[in-house]
Image: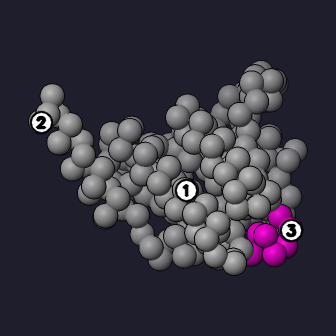
């Protein structure tokens, strides 16, 4: 077991040191500041573990950083929109109902190829809504072609990708808690 733990710790270290781009963090911070100055909100969306992370980060931005943030994790919203519009379109339809032009959307997909997330990215692009993407696995995944800022983790291990995404998002929260952005 120790060898397994050491292997994964080394993968986490590599992802943190290599895949967390300070320039991308600065650009993301600038987009957040721009959104706040326009009185927009942050919208976080993901599937599975990325949905749980989206919920956590939205609450931290709102409560700890004083920045209005929401996420789409309500079972009634997801099941209603998935039933009425198809699972691949529920995020897009949610954005149609809840997103405003001054908002900033964060879309997270470990693979970067989740159809509901990629369709939502296309919607943001088509409607000039600022977008930050977080993905992993294949460097040429579909999601990476859409964001104003794209974070990518060079791993095909879900936990490595998701935890690195979580660190990226919490770095952004901490940055706004500890500065006057």
Tell me the quarter of the image containing the C terminus.
Answer: bottom right
Please name the residue shown 66% across and 33% down the image.
88
- Is 71 placed above or below 90 here? below
Determine which quarter of the picture holds residue 90. Answer: top right
Q: Disc 2 to disc 1, how far (Cα)?
A: 29 Å
Q: Is residue 103 visible?
A: yes
Circles 3, 1 touching at the beta carbon (< 8 Å): no
- Label 2: state its secondary structure: helix
- Locate residue 179, reporting x and y percent: 64, 76
Determine which quarter of the picture holds residue 20. Answer: bottom left
First in residue order: circle 2 vs circle 1: 2
- The disc at residue 123 is none
Please name the residue shown 70% across and 61% down the image.
65
Residue at the disc numbered 3: 39
Tell me the quarter of the image containing the N terminus.
Answer: top left
First in residue order: circle 2 vs circle 3: 2
Left or right: 104 with respect to 30?
right
Q: Which residues are magenta?
A: 34-40
- Is 112 placed above or below 75 here? below
Q: Disc 2 to disc 3, how far (Cα)?
A: 49 Å
Residue at the disc numbered 1: 169
- Locate residue 18, reporting x and y percent: 31, 64
Mark 1: give few (<14), some (14-19) or many (20+) Cα within 10 Å. many
Colour scheme of the picture: one colour
First in residue order: circle 3 vs circle 1: 3
Please name the residue shown 55% across and 31% down the image.
48
Please name the residue shown 69% across and 69% down the image.
32
């Amino acid at each position: 077991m120790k060898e397994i733990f050491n292997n994964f710790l080394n993968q986490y270290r590599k992802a943190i040191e290599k895949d967390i781009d300070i320039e991308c963090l600065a650009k993301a911070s600038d987009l957040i500041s721009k959104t706040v100055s326009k009185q927009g909100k942050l919208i976080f969306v993901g599937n599975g573990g990325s949905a749980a992370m989206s919920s956590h980060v939205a609450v931290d931005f709102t409560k700890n950083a004083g920045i209005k943030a929401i996420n789409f994790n309500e079972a009634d919203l997801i099941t209603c929109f998935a039933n009425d519009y198809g699972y691949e379109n529920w995020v897009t339809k949610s954005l149609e109902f809840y997103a405003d032009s001054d908002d900033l959307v964060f879309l997270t997909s470990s693979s970067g190829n989740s159809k509901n997330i990629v369709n939502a990215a296309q919607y943001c692009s088509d409607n000039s809504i600022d977008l930050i993407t977080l993905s992993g696995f294949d460097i040429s995944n579909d999601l990476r072609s859409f964001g104003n800022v794209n974070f990518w983790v060079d791993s095909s291990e879900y936990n490595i990708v998701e935890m690195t995404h979580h660190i990226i998002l919490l770095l952004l929260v901490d940055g706004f808690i500890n500065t006057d952005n």
